[in-house]
Image (cartoon, rainbow, N blue to C red):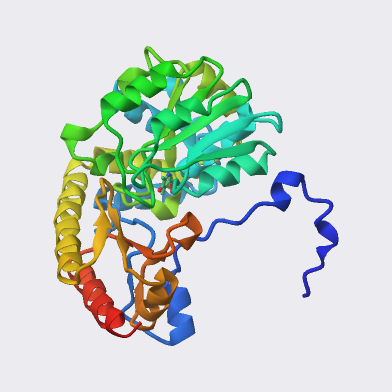
Amino acid sequence: MNITDNFYSLATPGVQRLVPYTPGKPIEELERELGLSDIVKLASNENPLGPSPMALAAINATLPDLARYPDGNGFKLKRALAEKFSVEMSQITLGNGSNEILELLARAFLTSTHEVIFSQHAFAVYPIVTQAVGATGVVIPARAYGHDLDAMLAAVNDKTRLVFIANPNNPTGTLLASDELRRFIAALPSHVLCVLDEAYYEFIDPKSRADSIAWLVDHPNLIVTRTFSKAYGLAGLRVGYSFSNPGIADFLNRVRQPFNNNMLALAAAEAALADHEHLQRTIAINNDGMQQLIDGFRQLELEWIPSAGNFVSVDVKRSGEAVYQALLQKGVIVRPVANYEMPDYLRISIGTPAENSRCLEALKAVLADV
Ligand SMILES: *Cc1c(COP(=O)(O)O)cnc(C)c1O
């Protein structure tokens, strides 16, 4: 059917200007398009080891109950999170991915009169949730691809209601120093909420991790978001969570769907949280794979942005989109990041040793003729 533009004037002003999120290309889509098999996808920062076997067992054990609604309060998962991170259950909000929490925050706290501050090259969902509710995004130029906290603080005014910080940031992988970050949060006025997006927290070198959950005591305007999609290997199930003041959690709870996390996801996340060994293997394979990719970039004389996550953005010194397309022809899916104002970069997720090798070989061949 043809698209008619009759609906443009009916859409809300924020939605009229929205550019939809571009996800990593699904493996099946490339299979259909090129008739290829044996595709390597390093495009969505997924766990190359797959989900924890304990999560899979929990899903199996839950299957007979699927005719029932899930626990709309996610009691067991919240209890497990509260225990592990020494917070109260009333501080926890569960989301259908941590993306949903970002959206709930926008719906609960933003109107068209508000401004939202985030960094250039920061995660693409921040402008989407901001614009969708008609608020105004204020983009602060990055400093060395990372957040310029001084400039972000200087942009705060009476209209500012929310600040998004991704630490580490996606797609750049940059990590803020913990003391700098804490000073920034402490300097924010009380009418500004600070959303600290720690989707890649588990991958950060323990020596460099911010003790962000402990900061909640002194900073009631702080919200820390995390996810089961990345290190915990459950991206397909969509489970994220936040820690905040119970007062903030209360408002998020008012706007969320009653059963926003499905039963399989709740059971799997709870089981995954207890699988320390799987998490440790995930971190180890990520550290090794990061080194493998970096060594490969060095051999190809490419520069990269040092990353604290499970991905790395590399400067391919020519159109990232062209290199991306050529890699697709070789069955390797990575992520072009021109939409992040990084047209010469590709973001590559860390895979298994074999996947990383395939990617580096394909990159070498492609760079010789693009
Ligand atoms: C992947 C990602 C998320 C959230 O993903 P969910 O699957 O919705 O939990 C949030 N923030 C950043 C920076 C990410 O890269």
Q: Which of the two residues, 246 or 260, is positioned nearer the viewer here?
A: 246
Residue 255 appears in the rendering: no
The image position of residue 358, as x and y in percent, is 23, 75
The image position of residue 75, as x and y in percent, is 43, 29
Is 168 above or below relative to 297?
above
The image position of residue 214, as x and y in percent, is 31, 19
Is 159 above or below relative to 357?
above
54 displayed left or right of 196: left
For the C terminus, which image quadrant?
bottom left
Residue drawn where x is 59% and y is 39% of the image:
137
Residue drawn where x is 16% and y is 65% of the image:
298
Q: How many marks?
A: 0
Quarter of the image for residue 2 reads bottom right
279 displayed left or right of 185: left
For the N terminus, which image quadrant?
bottom right
Is 93 above or below relative to 340?
above
Q: Which of the two residues, 66 or 82, is positioned nearer the viewer here?
A: 82
Task: Give the farthest residue toward the top.
Answer: 218
Residue 171 appears in the rendering: yes
